Amino acid sequence: MSVDLSVQIGALRPKNPVMLASGTAGYGPELSGGLDMAVLGGFVTKGIAVHPWEGNAPPRIAETHSGMLNAIGLQNVGLEAFLSDKVPYLHEMRGNGSVIAVNVIGKTVEEYYDVAKGLRGCDAIDALELNISCPNIKEGGIAFGTDCAAAAEVTAATVEGADKPVWVKLSPNVSNIAAMGVACEEAGATALSVINTLLGMAIDLDRRRPLLSIGRGGLSGPAIKPVALRMVWETSQACSIPILGMGGIWTARDALEFMVCGATAVQIGTANFVNPGTAAAVVAGMREWCDEQGIERIEDIVGTLRT
């Protein structure tokens, strides 16, 4: 049986629901040696700010028993270098039929607007993913991600500056993620990425100091999957726009669970560091599972959780 793996995300229709999450595959070429990028339904670049950011001082990554903590601090090349040095590869990748989204970061509403405006007319990209929820920088980002009014304000400003669809990446470090999703949807978001990393710490007991230079960081990997599933389900119940689910996806079954909970597509992150070929295996596993279940279109399983 021929299985249709394509899904609809607003006006975009990626060939399958599997994307790489921002910050886990650089700007594309970094992972291409271990993965045929043409198999992907989509790819989200590392975050881009108006000007380059150096990020946090090392150490800024720590392993945990079931995932990892990162405090990279959104190190990036800045808008000008992105347009001149990174876009040519994205043109090539987009030619393979993958949806390309650029993760947008800033420390003020104006900076988010300026990045969106600076990306106008760039035909190598299809969407902007607004990062309002990074927990590993000392200023900016997190404030937007934990307050509905602030999230709506920065979403609306980015939508005004952009000429492409705007997705918003939500923080799990809130008491009501569904309310955050509604605020962003009402402000013009066309999709929601759920979820970003959870706040966590790792300790060097002998030195009695945090392992990360800034103390805390973002926890990702299998440890957060149950939280992510719950938040995808809650957000999908409250919002009418597509959800891109993420958080601890390691296998095709993991990804399919997110879709049943209400995600139209998924993003793979931490698993890329362990096995760069994970996304390709997930795509193949999705097709095999649908064939076994007699499912002709994968988007028919979205939101079919029985509660």
Image (cartoon, rainbow, N blue to C red):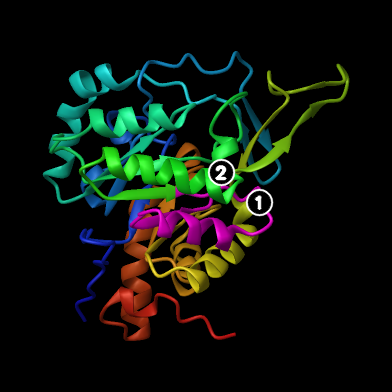
Could one spot residue 27 in this view of the protein? no
**Amino acid, disc 1:** Val
Q: Earlier in the sequence, mark 2 or mark 1?
A: 2
* 201 inside magenta stretch: no
Are the residues tagged 2 and 1 within 8 Å (C-beta)? yes
When the figure is inspected, residue 50 is found, relative to residue 305, above or below; the finding is: above
On the image, the x and y values in percent for residue 210 come to 77, 23
Q: Quadrant of residue 10?
A: bottom left
Disc 1 crowd rating (10 Å Cα; few below 14, some 14-19, many 20+) is: some
Q: Specify the label residue 174 is tagged with.
A: 1
What residue is shown at x 61% (from left), y 51% (from top)? 172
Q: Quadrant of the C terminus?
A: bottom right
**Amino acid, disc 2:** Gly
Q: Which residues are magenta?
A: 169-195
Number of callouts in the render?
2
On the image, the x and y values in percent for residue 257 come to 50, 69
Q: Quadrant of residue 296?
A: bottom left
* 174 inside magenta stretch: yes
For this rendering, which residue is in front, 4 or 72?
A: 72
What residue is shown at x 31% (from left), y 79% (from top)? 291
Q: What residue does disc 2 label?
A: 145
Indicate the secondary structure of the residue bearing disc 1. loop
Q: Quadrant of the N terminus?
A: bottom left
In this picture, residue 152 sits left or right of residue 207:
left
What residue is shown at x 67% (from left), y 46% (from top)? 66
Give the alpha-carbon distance from disc 2 to disc 1, as whole Å.
Answer: 8 Å
Indicate the secondary structure of the residue bearing disc 2. helix
For this rendering, which residue is in front, 127 or 154?
A: 154
When the figure is inspected, residue 237 is found, relative to residue 12, above or below; the finding is: below
On the image, the x and y values in percent for residue 83 come to 21, 23
